Image: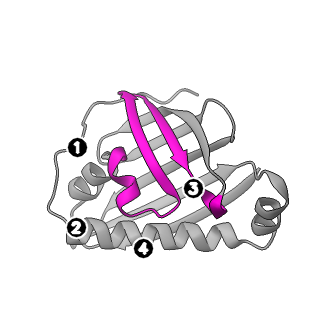
Amino acid sequence: MSTVEAETVVNVPVRVAYDRWTQFEDFPDFLPGVDQVTQISDDTLHWVVSPAGVTREYDAVITEQTPDEVIAWKSTDAPLNSGRVTFESNADETTRVTLKLEWEPEGFVEKAGAAMMVDDAFAKTDLAKFKDYVEEHAPVDGWLGEIPGHS
């Protein structure tokens, strides 16, 4: 598994950042490798992605969700991946967003990219795009339900 971590500070309160992240079906608006996300249920998403021009589809389940704090997920089939995003409120009404992804590179190009840490650069770019998106768009109402984490 390859592990990628990135963080950014967005110039919005934690509730605004968290609510925007819960709008999974909007991810293609700011993430170039994401073609479509369909929310099947409160805790299940269907993804269509095309990293490096290779289209893949998979389902992912949200394994933990606490409003204004954390959203974690893992794929239920290939390509294997999991992630966790945390939201930390700062005193100045900004929010630190930290992203950790784990994924299983498939094929030569993905394995080479992971070895050269290209995926780290993509994660940082994706968070920068999220920052721009959340700061430029009006706040939305997010889902405030909880999905307790499992140990």
Say which residue label 2 marks: 12
Alpha carbons under labels 2 and 1: distance apart: 15 Å
Could you tell me the amino acid type at mark 1? Gly
Question: Mark number for residue 100?
Answer: 3
The picture quadrant where one finds residue 143 is top left
Alpha carbons under labels 4 and 1: distance apart: 21 Å
In the image, what residue occupies the spot 52% across and 39% down?
Answer: 73
Look at the image and tell me in which quarter the C terminus lies.
top right
Identify the mark nearer the N-term, 2 or 3.
2
Could you tell me the amino acid type at mark 3? Lys
Does the residue at mark 2 contact the one at mark 3 (Cβ under 8 Å)? Answer: no
Asked whether 86 or 35 is in front, the reply is 35
Judged left or right of residue 28, residue 110 is: right
Could you tell me the amino acid type at mark 4? Ala
Disc 4 is placed on an element classified as helix
Say which residue label 1 marks: 142
Q: Is residue 84 magenta?
A: no
Disc 1 is placed on an element classified as loop
Q: Closer to us: mark 2 or mark 1?
A: 1
**Span highlighted in magenta in the image:** 24-53
Circle 3 crowding by C-alpha within 10 Å: few under 14, some 14–19, many from 20: some
In the image, what residue occupies the spot 21% across and 62% down?
Answer: 13
